[in-house]
Amino acid sequence: MPGTRGAVPVPLHTNGGQRDLTEEILEAVDQHEHVPTAEAFPSTPQDKIKAALDRLASRQMVEYETHDKEEVHLTEEGQAIADEGSHEYKVWDAVRKAGRLSLKDPSLVNASAKLGQGNAFKLKWIKKDGDALVSLTDSVSDTTRQQLQHAQEHRAFQDPKLLKDYSKRKLVNTQKVIAYVARKGPRWAKEMPVEVTDLTAELIADGSWKTANFKPYNFKAKGTLGGEGVGGGTGALHPLNKVREEFRKIFFNMGFEEMPTARFVDSGFWNFDALYVPQQHPARDLQDTFYVSDPPEAGPPGADESMDIVLAEMDVDDDQDESDHPSSDPATRAKETTAKLDYQAYYDNVRAVHQDGKYGSIGYRYPYTDAETRRLVLRTHTTAISAYVLHRLSADPRPCRYFSIDRVFRNETVDATHLAEFHQIEGVIADYNLTLGGLQAFLKRFFRNIGVPDLKFKPAYNPYTEPSMEVFAWHEGLNKIVEIGNSGMFRPEMLLAMGLPEDLRVYGFGLSLERPTMIKYGISNIRELLGHKVDLGFIESNPAVRLDRE
Ligand code: PHE
């Protein structure tokens, strides 16, 4: 038969040349109209029989019925009777052998001998003669023994009424067993046919699909567990993704919208200049930043359509007021927003505020170069995205909350807790007349939501925020205060250059995703979490986390 996998005969000999059970069943069904499996295969476990029957039944070669039945088993006492005779028989036998057996004989004192004596009287096998017993007959038929022997052999009584009697006497008990009765099916064949597993182009072309014997699907097959064997593996979420989902939930619950961040490579303009990072700042050194050499440079700052469409979708989603009749079609809306923005004017503002000072700031007073602004970098923080999004906000300034969780890159020395790339969690909040106290209150609430109470704040420096605060918290495991984030209020040099109104203030804060993940999963070396040394078993078996619970 044609086809790459086309005809695949189902192997019959799966146990090293021994006859396969399916083959034995086919043989038995061939010879007998009905095959009660319990009798035909007394030493094979019925679940194995069922598996083999299912294999044949799914191909309609064999049909079977399931029979629940009660099997009679002898108790220890019942077994003794079947082996040695009933109590009455043993008494009669002793009397017969002795000729006369004294009533005081020690063999007559135990309980079963008393029972046997009574029965033997009733059966008229023996009688009392003075103080002794004598036999009334030369031979007896020990029905009890015979019936038990029969039950033992057939696992049932000839007369079902006997079951009740013998059960009551605790000589037998019953056990439920499932067995099957197999017979030929509508597509009976004595041998497993060659089966086709794939419908191929050749089968269709030469018409042989019409008569081909396709292997049936087994819809009852149990799936393999995740990660087991070749092809059996199911997906598993990486711990970073699990923790990321937790953070996303918390942000959404606190009224944040998620910024689009699919922009690993960005220009010096968005990554640094827009954030009022001077062009000579040490963070822009080759030691700290990865530069991209091909393509050699970015174009002038402008609208990024793929970002804008996502932002426009968000705007359409939470559009309540229709005052200036914005479009509800995201593509149109994105264009409307872009039309309100002047990227050239923004760029000129950024240059002016760096080089000459503007908005009441004396600036850095250095010659600002176009070349530096166009250099392409692997973004060193997602704040580059926040800058882009905040600039778009100037088209329609309003209170809003944005967050992002994505990858950033830093050309730093790699050690047990740092890699050259990590994930930054970042949030920005824009509102009128915000204060530093408000930022502290917000951060306390945010970190309480992720299970970190009692923050400490330390004044810090960022080129783009003033004031800036590092965020610290007590770490139970390490038994000391550790830095968990960075925050601040964006500088007017940054926001006013974007064209945002003077009284609109913006909080910003950031933290790494790796740090809380490592703490939650008790990982001390980042290489256990990321990179080629990661143990897949750990990824597959790690539990879900709740940030707000221990
Ligand atoms: N970009 C900062 C960092 O890399 C985080 C931050 C974002 C700080 C916004 C202040 C405001 O750590």
Image (cartoon, grey):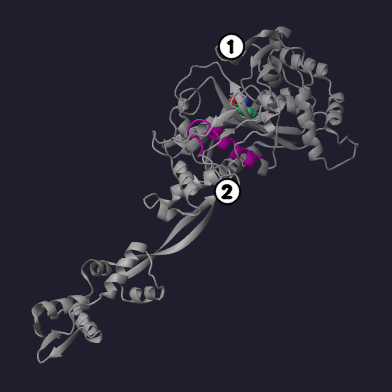
User: Which disc, if any, is residue 285?
Assistant: 1
If the picture is divided into quarters, which one holds ligand 1?
top right
User: Which disc, if any, is residue 185?
Assistant: 2
Instruction: Give the residue at x 64% y 33%.
Output: 212
For label 1, the crowd category at 10 Å Cα-Cα, with few meaning under 14, some 14 to 19 and many 20 or more, is few
Q: Secondary structure at mark 1?
A: loop
Q: Looking at the image, how many numbered discs can be counted on the residues?
A: 2
The answer to which of 462 and 527 lies nearer the viewer is 527
x, y percent for residue 38? 42, 55
Q: What range is drawn magenta here?
A: 225-251
For label 2, the crowd category at 10 Å Cα-Cα, with few meaning under 14, some 14 to 19 and many 20 or more, is some
Report if residue 243 lies within the magenta region: yes
Q: Secondary structure at mark 2?
A: loop
Q: Is residue 170 left or right of residue 223?
A: left
x, y percent for residue 178? 45, 58
x, y percent for residue 320? 83, 43
- Cβ of mark 1 under 8 A from ligand 1: no
Label 1 or label 2, whichever lies nearer to me, is 2
